[in-house]
Image (cartoon, helix red, strand yellow):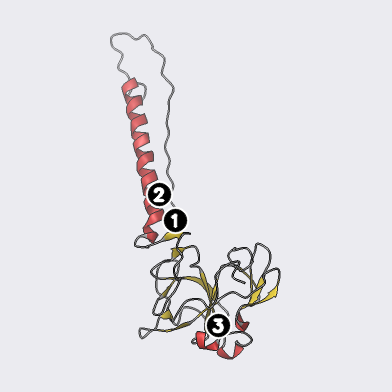
Amino acid sequence: MRFDNQHASEDCDEECADCEHDSDYQPSIFSDDRASLARRDYAKLLASVGGLTAVASLTAPLTGLTRVFERSYTGPVYSDGIYLVDGEGERVSENALSEGEKMTVFPEPRPGIERAPTLLVRHAEDAYGGATNLEYTVSGYAAYSKVCTHAGCMVSNEEGETLVCPCHFGKFDPTAGAEVVGGPPSRALPQLPITLSSDGNLIATGDFNGPVGPGGE
């Protein structure tokens, strides 16, 4: 679901000392007290506007999300016909990945819930075996929860084709139903049933086939 805002302002709070001047003295706009106050007000205004701009830039990509980082949501993560979207909210097409690649995707209507992050991988169709539910795959794509079943960290690293959780080095084989092949996790990452929509984008046909994250033994 690429933000970069920089803001610069100077704010002087020191009081200038009074000076004696002759009748011909004309204060500089940089030394006059009124100008100093004006500069401070202007700097604060710029800082405020800059801050609002930064907040707007952070929230803009989340516009329209029904749930943003919502931990209390207990409903289904996916359901039949829900589109998979990337981090920018764009639907994922059949050509999004080449074999051997992976990406993080989300359910289109509720990408901000805690259990939403999903690993989408693509391999040769004949590479899948083991505990993989082949009916849940399409065009070489398989999808698994990204939330580690050991402590709830995000499975974001890899060793070759093996998915690795960076927290406690749990390892999962995406071509074998994301079964555990190393580390402390006691169960596989839940698999998401997916297929292609009529418009060529990936959609879910139901929810994960097991509980997301730790627990659920």
Q: Quadrant of the C terminus?
A: bottom right
Quadrant housing residue 197? bottom left
What residue is disc 2 on?
54
Tell me where residue 73 appears, x and y as whole percent.
Answer: 45, 62
- Gap between marks 1 and 2 measured at Cα: 8 Å
> Which quadrant of the view contains residue 76?
bottom left
Quadrant the N terminus occupies: bottom left
Q: Secondary structure at mark 3?
A: loop
Please state which amino acid type lies under the numbered disc 2: Ala
- The amino acid beneath tag 3 is Glu
Q: Residue at x 60, y 81 (%)?
A: 177
Q: Looking at the picture, how far across and down is residue 108, in whole percent?
A: 40, 70
The circle drawn on residue 99 is 3
Which of 65 and 75 lies nearest the eye of the viewer?
75
Determine which of the numbered discs, if any, sits on residue 3 in the image. 1
In this orientation, does residue 128 appear?
yes
Q: CA distance from mark 3 to mark 2?
A: 38 Å
Mark 1 to mark 3 CA distance (whole Å): 30 Å
